[in-house]
C-alpha cells in the first residue's frame, strides 16, 4: 500500500515486540502511508525484542513505557510531542497479556491477583492512556485512537481464558471514553476485533493451531493477517474514517457473522 493517506500525521504506536507483532506490521504500514510516530513498549520487551530494527527501518524513536504506569505514560506523551513537534493524530494500543494464560491456569481455577494484573495491562492501560492524552489535550481534532480486541469479548472461546473478560472490558472503555473524546475533543476511539494471528501473544493461547484452522474454514474470506490488520488500521487513522467512532470493528474475514460454514459441516459429517 503506497497511498500517502497519513502524510503529515503523527502518533504513538504501542506493542511492537518482534516482526510478527500486529503493531510491528502497523508501524510499517503507517510509515508506508507517510505517517510519523514514536514506538513504545514495556522496558522488559525493549530488552527482549528487536524493536530497534523497526525504529531504524521507519526512522522512528523508541521510548520505554509500562502502559500501566501513569508516570510512564505522561512522560512518553511529553517526549513524543517534543520529538514529533506537536500534538498527536493517532495512537495504537496493541497490548495484551494474561499471567493466567502464560502459567496455564484453567479459567475455573484462576489466580485472582494474576487476573487483576492481566486486566490492568490488557484493559485498564487503555483507560490510563486515554486519560493521560485527554488531560494533556495531546490529541489533534479529528485524531484517531485504536485498540486491538478479539471476538471472545462477545462469544465463548474456552482457551482464551481471562483474556476474554479483559477484551470485553477494553471494548467498553473504548465506548465510554470515546464518548467524551468525541464530544469534547473531536477525537474518535475504536477497537478492531482481529482474526486469530500467529504472534507471541497469540501463541500463548492453548490449541492455537487447531483454532486458526477452524477460523480459516469458518471465514468466507479466510483469516485476516497481521499485515491486513495493519492496513485496516491505517484507514482508521486516515481522514477517510472521520465519523467512525465508539465501534468494535470486526476484521476477521467474516468469521463473527457465520453460524457454520460448509467446510466445517463437511468435516463433521459421517462419510457415506
Ligand atoms: N494474536 C492474535 O491472535 C490476536 C487476535 C486478536 C487481537 N489480538 C490483540 O492484538 C494486540 C497485539 O498482540 P499481538 O498478537 O501482536 O502480540 P504481541 O505479543 O506481539 O504484542 C503484545 C504486546 O503487548 C506488550 N505489553 C505487554 N505488557 C505491556 C505493558 N505493561 N506495557 C506496554 N506494553 C506491554 C508486549 O510487550 C507486546 O509487544 C493485543 O491486544 C492482542 O490481544 C491478538
Image (spheres, grey):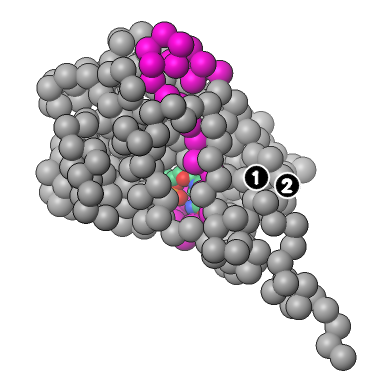
Q: Position of residue 180 (x, y in %)?
A: 48, 12
Image quadrant in which you'd find residue 111? top right
Q: Position of residue 270 (x, y in %)?
A: 86, 83
Does 35 sit left or right of 122 as displayed?
left
Q: Quadrant of the N terminus?
A: bottom left
Q: Is mark 1 within 8 Å of ligand 1?
A: no
What residue appears at the point 61 percent right and 62 percent down from the top-left corner? 219
Q: Which mark is residue 167?
A: none
Does 222 sit left or right of 6 as displayed?
right
Q: Would you say residue 188 is visible in this rendering?
A: yes
Whether 37 is among the magenta residues is no
101, 247: nearer the viewer: 247
What residue appears at the point 60 percent right and 41 percent down from the top-left corner? 163
Q: Position of residue 34 (x, y in %)?
A: 18, 42
Residue underneath mark 1: 152
> What secondary structure is found at the residue carrying circle 1?
helix
What residue appears at the point 71 percent right and 45 percent down from the top-left corner? 155
Contact? badges 1 and 2 (CB < 8 Å) = yes
Does 109 sit left or right of 182 as displayed?
right
208, 188: nearer the viewer: 188
Which residues make up the magenta segment?
Answer: 176-204
Q: CA distance from mark 1 to mark 2?
A: 6 Å
Rendered position, 244 above or below 219: above
Whether 199 is among the magenta residues is yes
Image quadrant in which you'd find residue 254? bottom right
Residue underneath mark 2: 156
Crowding near the residue tagged with mark 1, few <14, some 14–19, many ≥20 C-alpha atoms within 10 Å: many
Q: Would you say residue 51 is visible in this rendering?
A: no
Amino acid at each position: 500500500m503506497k497511498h500517502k493517506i497519513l502524510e503529515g500525521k503523527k502518533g504513538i504506536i504501542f506493542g511492537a515486540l518482534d516482526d510478527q507483532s500486529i503493531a510491528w506490521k502497523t508501524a510499517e504500514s503507517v510509515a508506508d502511508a507517510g505517517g510519523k510516530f514514536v514506538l513504545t513498549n514495556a522496558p522488559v520487551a525493549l530488552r527482549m525484542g528487536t524493536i530497534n530494527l523497526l525504529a531504524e527501518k521507519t526512522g522512528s524513536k523508541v521510548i520505554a513505557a509500562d502502559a500501566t504506569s501513569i508516570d510512564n505514560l505522561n512522560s512518553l506523551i511529553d517526549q513524543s510531542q517534543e520529538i514529533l513537534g506537536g500534538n498527536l493524530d493517532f495512537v495504537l494500543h496493541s497490548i495484551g497479556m494474561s499471567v493466567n494464560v502464560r502459567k496455564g491456569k484453567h479459567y475455573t481455577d484462576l489466580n485472582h491477583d494474576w487476573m487483576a494484573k492481566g486486566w490492568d495491562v490488557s484493559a485498564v492501560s487503555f483507560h490510563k492512556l486515554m486519560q493521560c492524552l485527554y488531560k494533556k489535550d495531546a490529541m489533534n481534532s479529528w485524531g484517531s485512537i485504536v485498540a486491538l480486541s478479539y471476538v471472545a469479548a462477545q462469544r465463548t472461546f474456552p482457551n482464551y481464558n481471562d483474556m476474554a473478560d479483559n477484551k470485553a472490558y477494553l471494548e467498553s472503555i473504548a465506548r465510554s471514553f470515546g464518548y467524551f473524546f468525541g464530544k469534547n475533543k473531536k477525537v474518535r476511539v475504536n477497537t478492531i476485533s482481529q482474526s486469530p494471528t500467529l504472534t507471541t501473544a497469540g501463541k500463548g493461547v492453548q490449541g492455537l493451531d487447531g483454532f486458526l484452522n477452524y477460523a480459516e474454514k469458518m471465514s468466507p474470506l479466510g483469516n485476516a493477517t497481521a499485515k491486513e490488520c495493519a492496513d485496516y488500521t491505517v484507514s482508521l487513522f486516515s481522514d477517510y474514517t472521520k465519523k467512525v467512532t465508539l465501534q468494535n470493528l470486526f476484521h476477521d474475514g467474516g468469521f463473527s457473522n457465520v453460524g457454520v460454514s460448509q467446510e466445517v459441516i463437511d468435516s463433521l459429517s459421517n462419510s457415506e
